[in-house]
Amino acid sequence: SITRKPAGSSVYAGGMYFGYYLALGSLLPFISLYYERIGLTGVQIGVLTALPVLILSSTTLLWGAIADKFRLHKKILSAALLLTPLAVLIVPQTIEFLPLIPVILAYAISTSPIVPLMDSMALEIAEANRTSYGQLRVWGSIGWTLSTLLIGSLIEQAGIRIFFYTYAGIMGALFLLSFFQPARTHQQTVSGNQNFRRFFRLDIIIFLLSVYLISITNGALYGFFSIYMDGIGANESVIGLSWSLSSLSEIPVLIFSALAIRRIGSTGLLKISFIIYSLRWFLFAFINQPGLALLVQLLHGMTFGTFLVGSVTYMNERAPEGMGTTAQAVLNTVTFGLGAITGSLLGGYLVDNFSMSSLFLVLSGIAGSAFFLFRLVPKFYRE
């Protein structure tokens, strides 16, 4: 059973999301630009940006299992929030490729448990306080949007290295806040082996395969969308606006996600997401004007927003008792690890050997395949 948490715990979870994505929005959009400015080659930049994804794929599940098994959620999150900004502060101290590799590895290892731990905490708080995951997670989208809108002008005034220090400062504040984490309430009730057997049922495997397919399309988009926009005539400010619009479009979807979950469930939300994903990629294949691309970017909320809430909720509903963090770690590994890597590689191959239009047509087909695969779930599981 779950004891009701204080109402302030919802504010706490929302604040942690806001701060984390405020920090992330100051780092991720500009780290590749920094690598370019210090003279690294395209291959070297590719290696450094791929390393965190590879590490996430191999360590997130381990962190989640350790946290659930030994009840170390609060300690691991605090340690990660301390070590991650320390690693980031070392990055601008060198401009050489080889010395950067161990620093980026340290960053990747320390940051990998943060999102699964925050998600599992938010899910417990939402369940206890009869709110929704989306209404807590929306503060992350607000933080990301605010950060991406402001950090560019800050870099113009103070130099490109400033984003390392803004990131570290915000993460340092989150580390101090982490000492006030609410107590976890779920505990494992059966042995780990029994839990894992219950966890990897056929319906969950089909769900994860569907999520993997959608994540391939997201990975390709994140790697090549700015290049696509540049190719159809968008300047840097319009490219930046396209990313801000996408995160803004998440906000209403996340706010009203609880209503959607009550009416159609996580399964219905995911089906809507998969269908609109296929449509969104199909439209990009035929657009040759930046203004039209900006309009289609507004579908991001109805694709990624619904996908995020639907997948996190779906996984949480089916996770064995006491394995909430492990469940979210598995989901993160598939979504932001394996899917992202595959999408980047597939996108590079298609763009080099065919065209950007061909890439989006293939992505549309993959998203459609995810929808039809996910429809098989009711054959193995009844809600």
Image (tube, helix red, strand yellow):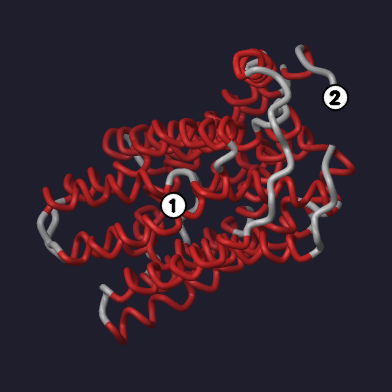
Q: Between disc 1 and disc 2, whose residue precedes?
A: 1
| Residue displayed at 65% across by 42% down | 307
Q: Is residue 300 left or right of residue 256?
A: left
Q: Is residue 126 left or right of residue 365?
A: right
**Amino acid, disc 1:** Ala
Measured Cα–Cα span from mark 1 to mark 2: 36 Å
| Residue displayed at 35% across by 40% down | 355
Q: Residues within 10 Å of mark 2 (few under 14, many from 20)?
A: few
Residue 348 appears at what percent x and percent y?
31, 38
| Residue displayed at 60% across by 14% down | 193
State the mark number for residue 383: 2
- Most foreground residue, 90 or 146: 90
Q: Is residue 334 left or right of residue 97?
A: right
Q: Is residue 302 left or right of residue 53?
A: right
The residue wearing badge 1 is 80
Tell me if residue 11 comes above or below residue 115 in the rendering.
Answer: below
